[in-house]
Image (tube, rainbow, N blue to C red):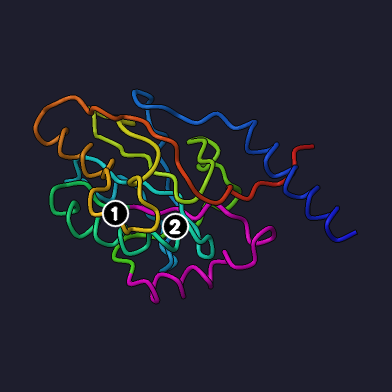
Amino acid sequence: MKTSVLFAFLFCSLLATAQVTTLEPGDTAPTFSLKNIDGKKVSPDDFPNAKGFILVFTANTCPYAIAYEKRLVELNEKFSRLGYPVIAINPNPQKLSAGDSFEKMQEKAKEANFSFPYLLDEGQTITNHYGARVTPHIFLLQKKEDNLKIVYTGAIDNDTEDKNPDKIKYVENAIAALESGKNIEVASTKAIGCTVKRPAAD
């Protein structure tokens, strides 16, 4: 009986995710203002000197998200000074994932030494606008006049376990291309991670 219930839940979660349309490179990025772990709202407008953002949808307990925590901190340390800070958003509702509660987010940020905002998307409005499917799911944004444009989306790199010294660093390569005025050679990859927890479709 328990197996049947679990299968039904997973099936409905996958169905709900399948109905979401993921934004692609070239699309305008939706703006947002969400609650940070310090209780204050954070928006891209709070970074007037930024050239863009490394926006990542991530979570507290997903093994894939945990595997990339250190690399997210390193990305922020390396690229925030160049104008591309990390902003993390937790897309999972507490009622579907108890480990993703706001209190657990605060604990995670302290434990993992997050040096960037970690925002809660209550109601999943922003998650669904972007079409984030898994955690972690990257959307690299670039400021274009009065808008933000998506210039890369997908995985951080092609080495989840962080054991390959010759890994392809998709996000780093994309920012390097932006900084040099070149086209991004790989603008989209498949994001690998845990499925975003979404309520079953009615």
Q: Residue furthest right?
A: 1
Secondary structure found at label 1 = loop
| N-terminal-most mark, 2 or 1 | 2
The magenta stretch is 87-113
Report the residue at 33% width, 58% height from top: 162
- How far apart, in angstroms, are the residues tagged by discs 2 and 1? 30 Å
User: Residue 93 at what x, y percent from top left?
Assistant: 62, 56
The question of residue 53 being in magenta is answered with no
In the foreground, 6 or 153: 6
Question: Where 164 sits versus 169, above or below?
Answer: below
Residue 164: which numbered mark, if any?
Answer: 1
- Image spot of residue 66 (x, y percent): 44, 63
Amino acid type shown at disc 2: Leu
Residue at 63%, 38% in the rendered image: 17
**Quadrant of the image occupied by residue 184:** top left
Residue type, numbered disc 1: Asn
